[in-house]
Amino acid sequence: MTHKSSTLYFSYNFVNVEDMRKREYLGQLELMVLLAVMRPARDAYGVLISREIAEKSGRDVALASVYAALDRLERKGFVISSLGEPTAERGGRARTYFTPTAAGLREAREAHGTLMRLSSGLAGLKGELA
Amino acid sequence: MSPRMPPRLATWVLDHLGMRYRNESLGGDLFEEYQQGRNRLWYWRQVIAAVVARQPRPLKPKTRLLFLRIFGHILADLGVVLLFSQIAESEHRIRPVDYLMSPANIAVLALLGLTAATGVGLVIWATRQGSRGTHN
């Protein structure tokens, strides 16, 4: 490798590392919450999101953990929230509705694609090992 | 029909020590679920999860530096005071020089000196960082 090309190679790697630092990756719970936010036809809120996760994953996730994940997703720009009206059936407290952003949809699509590619053809996932 | 009221104390804990993010909506969600037949134990578990999930408010850089300076001062003072008291301790011994020069004592003195130096270094570093922040 010549000096010029090695410098280029180094710069390319450096840019890749910088991209990795800037990029926000999703944790497992964050991805589950983001997918659950995408699921309802309209107006996803805490109870619906937590029920969706419990139904599809079989895990009973604490509502506080769902809100903590939603907080991180909102700070990353993957969801936006809006406050509804307080109602008597909720003890006079308002609902917060969540909607995925374009960046959130793109991130969910990419994460899903990556998982599909990584898991395709893995014998262990079909119980063919052991 | 009047709603089933969740445990009062748990609701108070949630309101005062719950999450910083959307705590009111979380409380409403818990109330809604409680109306659907969840029990008191479930409600308490959810409230405890909210208290645990509460994130500490991040300190401002200035406050963080101030805390570091105070910590540095404490470390330096503690190191110096213990260092001198360790040296003074030798006066009560029959052979003060032997006691002072013993490997165990030298190790203790070195450790205390290092503690004091770390404290001083921390104070200097935090002060410099603070003044750099003011100039920028």
Image (tube, coloured by chain):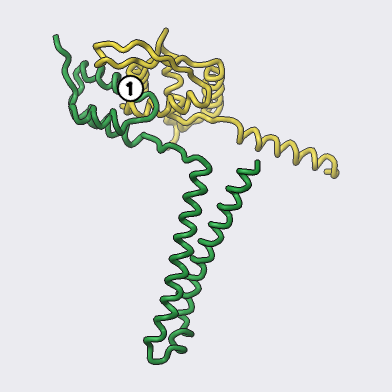
Chain colours: A yellow, B green
Residue at image mark 1:
B24
Q: In the shown orientation, is residue A53 left or right of residue B4? A: right
Residue nearest the viewer, comparing A18 with B61: B61
Residue A83, compared with residue B7, is above or below; it is above
Q: Count the marks: how many? A: 1
Q: In the shown orientation, is residue B4 left or right of residue B106? A: left
Residue B115 percent coordinates (x, y): 49, 65
Query: Residue at left 48%, top 25%?
Result: A73
Residue B23 percent coordinates (x, y): 34, 25
Residue nearest the viewer, comparing A115 with A105: A105
| Quarter of the image with the C terminus of chain A in it | top left
Query: Residue at left 33%, top 37%?
Result: B52
User: In this view of the protein, can residue A59 be seen by the observer?
Assistant: no
Residue B72, compared with residue A55, is above or below; it is below
Label 1 chain ID: B
Query: Residue at left 40%, top 38%?
Result: B56
Secondary structure under tag 1 reads helix
Binning the other alpha carbons within 10 Å of mark 1 as few (below 14), some (14 to 19) or many (20 upward) gives: many
The quadrant holding residue A86 is top left
The quadrant holding residue B88 is bottom left
Residue A104 percent coordinates (x, y): 52, 19
Query: Residue at left 46%, top 67%?
Result: B79
| Quarter of the image with the N terminus of chain A in it | top right
Residue A11 percent coordinates (x, y): 75, 38
Mark 1 belongs to which amino acid?
Glu
User: In this view of the protein, can residue B2 be seen by the observer?
Assistant: yes
For this orientation, the residue located farthest to the left is B1
